[in-house]
Amino acid sequence: MIFNLAVFLCTLTAMEGVGYLAHRYIMHGWGWFLHRSHHEPHLGALETNDVYLAALALIAFALVALGRAGHAPLQWVGAGVAAFGVIYVIVHDGIVHRHWPFKPRPRNRYLKRLYQAHLLHHALKGRDNSVSFGFLYAPPLHRLKRQLRERRKHQ
């Protein structure tokens, strides 16, 4: 039981790093054709960027299924991946982008910093020169603002 919990929590934590790398090098790299919709005005309930979330859900489902079929630790890896996806939808889509009808506003320091960091991520148009690629971790805002100023100079 403790081992399973440790696998779950380690996976959940590691997913922020996986998410950062995927966002920086895939979504803002060769996968920009899907992610571009996230950097344009939001017109409906879905955007092509949601393909990434669907892929994450399929990976989580496959890992849980493999774990249930006899590879037990994979079940908990899959649960960690799925939990990251749920947290992403709640925090990123719900609180940061306010895609929900009731439009919650961030009130605590962590959520405010995450919200502001994501606004800075969207400050420059296009896939290049963005800052702050994490989903649940935001670097200090003064550092992001400095990076953004430097990148604007070189545009």
Image (cartoon, rainbow, N blue to C red):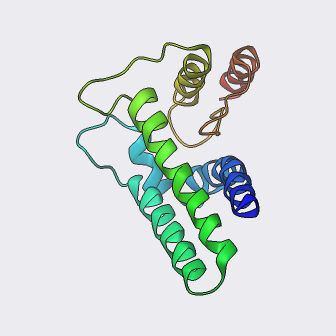
Quarter of the image containing the N terminus?
Answer: bottom right
Pick the residue in front: 128 or 153.
Answer: 128
Task: Indicate the position of residue 33 as horizontal and vertical percent values.
Answer: 45, 57
Image point (54%, 52%), residue name: 83
Image point (36%, 28%), residue name: 98
Image point (63%, 65%), residue name: 76
Pick the residue in front: 53 or 34.
Answer: 53
Task: Indicate the position of residue 35 as horizontal and vertical percent values.
Answer: 46, 50
Where 87 falls versus 58 (above or below)? above
Q: How many marks?
A: 0
Quarter of the image containing the C terminus?
Answer: top right
Where 119 falls versus 66 (above or below)? above
Task: Indicate the position of residue 23 as horizontal and vertical percent values.
Answer: 61, 49
Pick the residue in front: 73 or 148.
Answer: 73
Where 24 falls versus 126 (above or below)? below
Q: Residue furthest front?
A: 1
37 vs 129, left or right, is left
6 vs 129, left or right, is right
